[in-house]
Structures are given as C-alpha cells and as structure tokens.
Image (cartoon, rainbow, N blue to C red):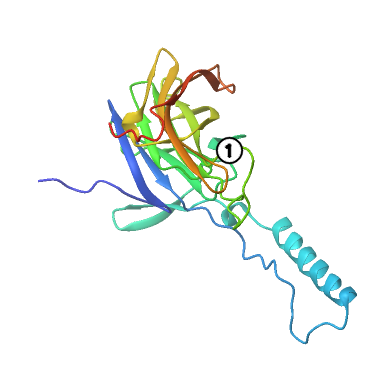
Amino acid sequence: SPTVERELFFEGDYLSSRREGDQVRVVLSGGAHLPNVNVYPDCRGGYDDGDDWRDAVESARLAAHSLLATAKLDDFVPNRFQRVTGTVSTLEPGCDGYWVPTAGSSEYGLTQIETFDLANVAANPSETAIVGAVQTVYANGGTLVLAGQSFDTSRFISGIVSAEEYMVNTTYLHRFDLDADPQGATYTGSATIPGTLIDQFAIDEKDGVLRLATHVQLSNGNEWRESSALYTVSGPTGSLEIAGRVENVAPNEQMHS
C-alpha cells in the first residue's frame, strides 16, 4: 500500500535520472526564463530619417537595460515547489550551485540536476545547474557527465564554397563529481570535443579519464565528409581538456554500436 510522503515540482522537462545508493539525481532540461525585455524599437508612426531610427533604437536599448538592472532573482531561475499534506510552498533555489561554463554556455536553456536523499525524504533536494542545453546523460558510481550537441550552420550560405573543410558538429561536456558531496553533484569543469555522441553508451569514465566515441561531420559548403573518432578527456577540477585522440576512423561510414 504505497502512500505519498511528499511531492516536488520543478520547471523544466525530464531528461534522465540515475540512482546510486540512497541518492537519486534527476536531470531536467529547460526552465530558465528572463524578464519580458523588448529589444525592438517602437516603429509606430514611421521615421523621417536615420537620426529618428537611431534614437528609437537607443531608447529601446536603455529601456531594456533599465528593466534588467531592476530584475530580481525570481525573474531568471526556475521555480521549485513542494506539496506536503495538501499545502503547496516554494523551495528557494540553491544559488551557490549555478554555473556558467566557459565551454558550451552559448547554447540556449538551463540544465538542472536535482539530488534527492531517499533516506531523508523530508530534506530539500540539492540543486546544481549549468547554463546550456544537453541531450545525453552518463553516470557511474563517482562521476556524472552531461553532453550537449552543437552545430555550426553559420557558413551554410547558398553558393559559398570554402577552400578548406570546417567542422559542422561539436559536443560540449560538463563533468560532475559525485563523491565530493554524496548528497549533491559538484561541478568540476567543461570541455569541447569534435563530433557528436550517438547516445549514452558512446561515453564512459575510468580513473578520472573520460572516453568518448563521436561521429564527426566536415564540409566545405558543397561536399560533406564524415568519419568517427575516439577522444580521451581528463584534467583536475576546472581544467578539463582533450588528452588523447584517434581521428578519421572509417571515413564515410557511420558508427551504430
């Protein structure tokens, strides 16, 4: 006869979850929001010359800056709620657990990791969040890795062909230590590697070294070429970098398993 002891509600979409002992870590995608900033000038009535247009743009810019300057924390971070015995209340955000990675922070969105202690269901979940969207979750007993895909489409302009190939797809990695704080997830660094992961089984970790198999796409704007690659990524806290690589494996073939 299961009974509900507590209900928790989070902004964002469920991506994945992992359990290690009594700790359950739920990864949520999205949930970030911004103040209602208008970035477009008021075009009603038209403009007589370029000076009028410039003044309208400057007015919109100043109004946006003023709104951001007076914004509160609640205007940015996702909301969290709990319901206990029918009463709904707000859970304050874990402000010390928000991070802006130097790699991968240009992608839209927010990714949250909420850690629950099954041995103490009354305790508030521990929260860690990074700026950026991810699609893949990997975890073992002591390490959690989030991976987000990125595609460079800036050169996809009709009729322009480059003399050199450029990389179309990359992956942003975000590593978390699960042993430093067993009740949470401690962010330890980010890195960028060429190509994209097929799924969570294309990554693992051993002795502090991440091993990743990726599918790499190259293009000169007209022709495309693809291959597979293997990368190892390691480093101390705050310094995650590519340590080794084997590239151009099986050109024009795709990796499936």
Residue at x-position 81% and y-position 73%: 56
**Toward which corner of the image does residue 115 lie, by quadrant?**
top left
Residue wearing tag 1? 165
Left or right position of 208 against 256 = right
The foreground one among 98 and 100 is 100
Give x and y (percent) for residue 235: 54, 17
Q: Is residue 110 visible?
A: yes
Residue at 36% x, 45% y: name it: 15
The residue sitting at the left extreme is 1
Quarter of the image with the C terminus is top left
- Measured as percent of width and height from the top left, residue 61 is found at 77, 64
Q: Is residue 1 left or right of residue 34?
A: left
Residue 106's place in the image compared with 256, above or below, is: below
The residue shown at (70%, 70%) is 40
Q: In this view, does 103 lie to the left or right of 180?
A: right
Camera-side residue of 171 and 173: 171
The location of residue 19, given as percent across then percent down, is 29, 31
